[in-house]
Image (tube, rainbow, N blue to C red):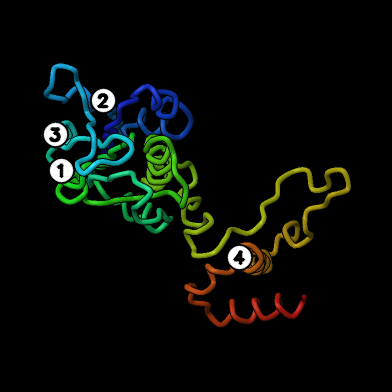
Amino acid sequence: MKIDILTLFPDMFTGVFQESILKKASERGLVSFRVTNFRDFADNKHRKVDDYPYGGGAGMVLMPQPLFDAVDHVKAQTASDARVILMTPQGERFTQKKAEELAKEEHLIFICGHYEGYDERIREHLATDEISIGDFVLTGGELAAMVIVDSVVRLLPGVLGNEASPVTDSFSTGLLEHPQYTRPADFRGMKVPDVLLSGNHARIETWRKKESLRRTLERRPDLLENYALNEVEKALLEEIKNEK
């Protein structure tokens, strides 16, 4: 996968792409990152990328020319089609399902805005997607783009050591993940559930499914509204409700 970031603050991405899973994925050739300062594409002598909004109002608006030219430039560097993702609080709410969709693409271009907003022609004629990571406002799109890149790259084949990890993550199954434990079995009197030490894989799997349902019911009951329960899960959920 090729990932391009268009930003006015390219140094913000240096540490993110040079650490942990993202760095390893890049070193292994599973993903390539390129960060471009779209101010370099401004066609005016002062390298302005923003201007006052027509009709008046507070703040400055990003001009279309630098971003259109920057996207044309990075697209020309690769033969594959690209999804052009506009980071904006007005966009579609980012979810694990969206991450899985984007992970199937060969080339992603993220536009990180600043100031009051974008010229509407950028939304209408340049972006293929508009994405928000939540109902709050950041000073720019950089942090949001980092979150999405991390979420997408970890889903690429070969990136994680255990290929089952992304499949069983919270939200990937439609439910929150069950509790996890490791050694020691008894830490300061806090003990690991006996079932996990039993060696009975069928019982362990049932326990995990039940605890996943319990955690989802307690913390994110809204997820269960769109989750198709099978008969076993319905019975387990009924048991949980009767325990209260």
Q: Which of marks 3 and 2 is nearer the N terminus?
A: 2
Q: Earlier in the sequence, mark 3 or mark 4?
A: 3
Secondary structure of the residue carrying numbered label 4 = helix
Pointer 4: what residue?
A: 216
Nearest to viewer (mark 1 / mark 2): 2
Q: Where is residue 162 in the image (x, y as percent from the top left)?
A: 49, 46
Pointer 3: what residue?
A: 65
Pointer 1: what residue?
A: 80
In front: 138, or 110?
A: 138
- Callout 2: few (<14), some (14-19), or many (20+) C-alpha neighbours within 10 Å? some
Q: Which residue is drawn at 59% across and 64% down?
A: 220
Cα distance, mark 2 to mark 4?
A: 42 Å
Cα distance, mark 3 to mark 4?
A: 46 Å
Q: Where is residue 185 in the image (x, y as percent from the top left)?
A: 79, 48
Q: Which of marks 3 and 1 is nearer the N terminus?
A: 3
Nearest to viewer (mark 2 / mark 4): 2
Cα distance, mark 4 to mark 1?
A: 39 Å
In front: 224, or 230?
A: 224
* Drawn side of residue 178 relative to residue 45, left or right: right
Q: Earlier in the sequence, mark 2 or mark 4?
A: 2
Three-letter code, disc 2: Asn
Q: Residue at x 29, y 41 (%)?
A: 57
* Drawn side of residue 122 relative to residue 89, left or right: left
